[in-house]
Image: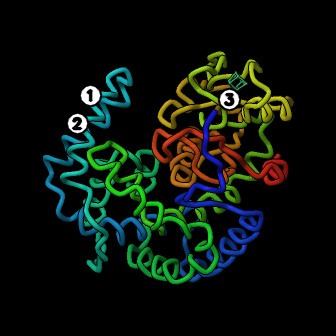
Amino acid sequence: MNNLSGDEIIYPYRLNEDYYANVKAFGDEFLEYSQKFNFKSDEESLEALCIGVYWYLYGSTALDLDSNIHQALSNLAEYRRAFPEDKPFIDDLRGKLLTKFLFKPFEKNNEKLNEENLSMLINFLEATGDYMDQIPHFRNFSHNLDDCLELTKWFCKNSRKYLGEYTFGLNEYLENNGTTHLMQEDVIFYHGHELEYHLNMLGAEIMTRIFKEEFEKRPRKAIILPGCMNSNSKKCRARQDRLGDVCTFCNPNCNAYKISKEYSDYEVYIVSHESTAFKGAKKEDMEELGIVGITCVLNLISGGWKSSNMLIPPQCVLLEHVACKSHWLSEDIYGNIDENHLNSIL
Ligand code: SF4
């Protein structure tokens, strides 16, 4: 399928066998620290942290964002979701506008976060098109905004201690790939700051705890695989089903084949793009289904909230490294997961 050996590649993140123990320890410390703020739930602690981190990373750009540009980019993102067949030319236009108006070098933001500034931040997130499943949580957030910033300060001080080794290659990866994503619609996503990687790692751990009980009660369980786990998406013969593509076992070397065979007691779907996930979900799925979502790091929080917003309780498993050429690599390689962790969830 490719000529690259996985060990030769510098990845933006890479897990090892200690990852789940480390992120669990960080999750314990985070939830203990967040008790001092009296959030009404662990989910509200996570919402507060997301707001604080996004404000820290993107607040300066958000405050500068012109309302017409926000409106134009939001409309284009909405149009793209509604008419996926027009993706090529919409993405071309979005890439240019995002690069010109939203892509700025990271600048520490020390402005106070108040209700008005939170609205500006939400406008920025909406304009990127990357945070649509998170935004409803921020619009409904009612806790003291100063606590978001205090929690974020703690997070910035501590995340490297637990998770820094997994993003060790991020700067080198971005330097090696230089300006390859400028003028492309994933320019903001692709240039995610190390803190966003750590936020998603911690977020997946917290979500897995929040939704575990509800997930376990569900009579149907589905594993949702990303497109990079099949061996060659162009030759893939999976058949379309209501909730995703289902493997027809055409190639024993394919990782989606292996998971579909090994976990044949569960529903297994391949979903090649986050925007199409659960499009065909019906009321019965919302009542019966729990999912294990497998994805690369920067999609974890959005994917988890996308599922829970549809009343489908999620559990999260991370790809050990990025694997697709649509965003990350010059060639597709196999996506892998820690199967022990998947087994511990199921
Ligand atoms: S084995 Fe399954 S997932 Fe892999 S390429 Fe064939 S049909 Fe697609």
Q: Quadrant of ligand 1?
A: top right
The tag on residue 89 is: 1
Q: Nearer the viewer, residue 185 or 45?
A: 185
Residue in view at x 40 percent, y 55 percent:
177
- Across and down, in percent, residue 83 comes to 35, 23
Asked if residue 327 is positioned above or below residue 143 in the image, the reply reads above
The local secondary structure at tag 3 comes to: strand
Residue in view at x 46 percent, y 64 percent:
50
Q: Earlier in the sequence, mark 2 or mark 3?
A: 2
The tag on residue 93 is: 2
Q: Colour scheme of this structure image?
A: rainbow
In the image, taking residue 212 as reference, residue 46 lies left or right, namely left
- Tag 3 residue: 269
The answer to the question of whether label 1 and label 3 lie on touching residues, with beta carbons closer than 8 A, is no
- Across and down, in percent, residue 182 comes to 29, 49
Crowding near pointer 3: few (<14 within 10 Å), some, many (20+)?
many
